[in-house]
Amino acid sequence: MSRVFEALCAHLKTHPEAEVQDAVKFLYQASFGGGHFLSDPDGAYQYLLKEAEIANRDAPYTEALGEQYARINLSALQELSPKTLFAMFKASSEDTPTDKTAFLSLLDELENADLFDKAEKAAFLKSYRAAGCPAVHHSEAYRRAYHPAYRVVKKAYADFLSAFIAIDKLTAEKAPVTVAIDGLCGSGKTTFAALLQSVYDCNLFHADDFYLPMPMRTPERYATPGGNVHWERILSDILEQIPKNESFSYRMFDCGVMDLGDAVQVTPKTLNILEGSYSTHPELIGRYDLKIFLKTSPETQSARILKRNGPARHKMFVEKWIPLENLYFTSYPVEKQCDLVFTT
């Protein structure tokens, strides 16, 4: 049984009034997300606001549609900003898959499963396939029983929903807001930061742009937990500048010349994110409004680094960078000091 079909079966157990077309809709959304590009974003946002007024406030915030997509129920708007949810929905709709191969396999799986009346299911699926397998609405029975009100988004948005809620709360209360994303290499910090940037108009900084300059690369420095990042410059060039709410510039380390590169100009924004290992170094941790930690299993970490960096650099990570990270994580209570922790 596929992961998507497992999710469907779990959904049907909690939604016994669902009909065949509701199952098809579930599988369609699991395959294609929202299923369409937003041709009228302003109108779609206004519709979201109207629908939120009558949404079931007791519905669970999220429901996975398999491994790629999820439903975020409008009940989440009790804590999540409508603008944030709409941005998630819009971003998730911009690269809708078009290949129907996997979806057609799911329909076959549905037809062969011991679900619904067999003759009724076969008749519906025959007619549905003949029509070209379009998007469908929920059945009237489903609507009466469950009053569905949700938006389909990429699953990662649902997985990190508590982080979006925390950021929405902070940015509604103050400005500027500064967020740190620390964690193990290969845990998805950069990917998560890009996910946040797809929703928020924010400044994003990377700890990897603050490598140690050559004169500081001494055995004594590397022996210091967290010493293999130039935290002094992160502090002076970034974290001390953000609260001033003024334009500033900084220079990223350029590995091509093993020295600092050209200046990068920064415009003041409400949200500012620093991602990367060592971003919550003891000398930096007090500068953040929200601290997030990402972790993963050693097996997953190794597989991701190998896929991302290739065998030669994977060996370097195993022999050098991971031990230095582990020294940092065992020397300081990094994970415990973070406000949110995610396992990826």
Image (cartoon, helix red, strand yellow):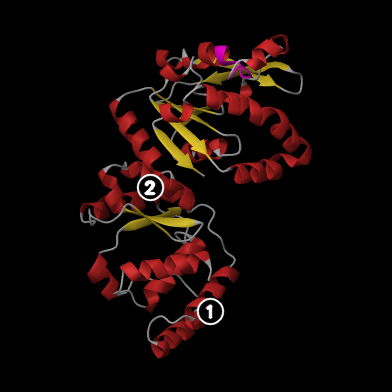
> Which quadrant holds residue 286?
top left
Front position in the image: 151 or 319: 319
Q: Is residue 39 left or right of residue 108?
A: left
Q: Residue furthest bottom?
A: 119
Give 1 or 207, whichever is nearer the viewer. Answer: 1
Q: Secondary structure at mark 2?
A: helix
Number of disc labels: 2
Q: Which residues are magenta?
A: 226-232
Q: Which mark is residue 86?
A: 2
Mark 1 falls on what kind of element? helix
Q: Which sits in the foreground, 51 or 176?
A: 176
Residue 207 image point, x, y percent:
58, 24
- Where in the figure is residue 97, as x and y percent of width and height? 56, 60
| Left or right: 315 in relation to 1 | right
Residue 87, image quadrant: top left
Q: Amino acid at mark 1?
A: Asp
Q: Quadrant of residue 215?
A: top right
Compare residues 35 and 329 and report the one nearer the observer. 329
Residue 85 location in percent, x, y?
A: 37, 46
